[in-house]
Amino acid sequence: MTDRMRRWQIDDYGRAALALKEVPVPRPGTGEVLVKVEAVSLNYRDTLVIANGLGAPLDFPFTPGSDLAGTVVAAGEGSRRFAEGERVISTFFPGWIDGLPRGDSATLPYQALGGAYPGMLADYVALPEEWLVRAPRTLAPEEASTLPCAGLTAWFGLVERGGLKAGETVLVEGTGGVALFGLAIARAHGARTIVVSGSAGKLERAKALGADIGIDRTAGDWVEAVRAATGGYGADHVLALAGGPALGRAVEVAAIGGRIAQIGIIEGFDAALPLGPLMLKQLTLNGIGVGHRRALEDLVRAVDTAGLKPVIDARYRLEELPAALDHLERGAFGKIVVTPG
């Protein structure tokens, strides 16, 4: 291992400030491990953090990217969770081990990697060992890197908070990383699956992955199309990935007693809901902010047991990060992954 490495960082907000720098390899401190980064999966959030910090101040120079898969190559004093050579993945929210996140009604619990904490887009990172979990045995590093945010978000919405059961109907909006994880998790649990997308081509690809019903939202009223396809029943679970006004449509399409996992903000942070259907259908609306470490460990076990496989749309080398971000902003079918090696 050399003493120098590459790391992406910004010294100001905006894509124009992104630069690939050569810096010293960090040394693991007490309770930390040094991880050789083998893959980093990107999230739409990363583009927003680079653009404006998502409205929060960043500590410059700042490195983006939250979702790492790699191998422990050195351990600091007092580190006991992992041995050298073990494969690990990051947790999105450091310190959130189980239960509810810390915070109060005025302080949002959003202290995440690649935001409040430095990101992963480098050859090596030194992290507290508590911020990591063991990677799945059955996934390559590129695949494993998609679990910390996209995979866990879908798992948390459907299983941890949603209580998904066999025979229920799951609707996912779009064909991005969280959506396709939702599709895979629903199928593994024996649920009926519906994918709503604005791309006929992506709908065909989703059906090839096992989606039972594909609805083109550009071809008419997609809520009525879902109702027609389900004999008026609707969906027991909705992964609401668009945000904004689309959340009201999720309320309309939900079945009696249905559960809505509000996840995405692509169409905005503000929403107006039809309160009549929300109340009279006895719906549960869960706000999903990724998930805790224990649930990520549950997901890892499910991946190894059920053979869950993430969908990777494209892989880019570390030096190709700007092209990877361009692809992400155009819209991906599944995940975009950056590999330093």
Image: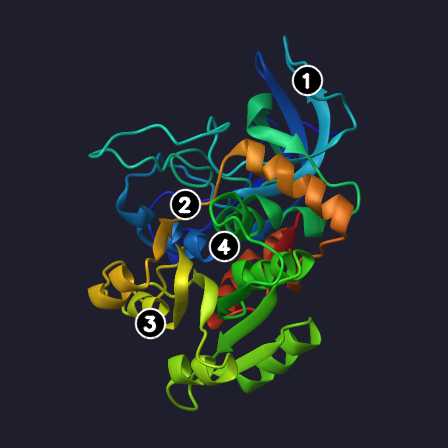
The amino acid on which the numbered mark 2 sits, given as a three-letter code, is Gly
Judging depth in this view, the residue of 310 and 126 nearest the camera is 310
Whichever of callouts 3 and 2 sits on the residue coming sooner in the sequence is: 3
The amino acid on which the numbered mark 3 sits, given as a three-letter code, is Glu
Q: Pinpoint residue 46: horizontal percent, then vertical percent.
A: 44, 52
Mark 3 neighbour density, 10 Å: few (under 14) some (14–19) many (20 or more): many
Q: CA distance from mark 2 to mark 1?
A: 30 Å
Q: Is residue 124 above or below residue 192?
A: above
Q: Which residue is label 1 attached to?
A: 75
Q: CA distance from mark 3 to mark 4?
A: 28 Å
Q: Which residue is label 2 attached to?
A: 289
The amino acid on which the numbered mark 1 sits, given as a three-letter code, is Ala
Q: CA distance from mark 4 to mark 1?
A: 29 Å
Q: Pinpoint residue 272: horizontal percent, then vertical percent.
A: 21, 65
Instruction: Kindly state the secondary structure of the residue where label 4 is placed.
Output: loop
Q: Is residue 309 left or right of residue 156?
A: right
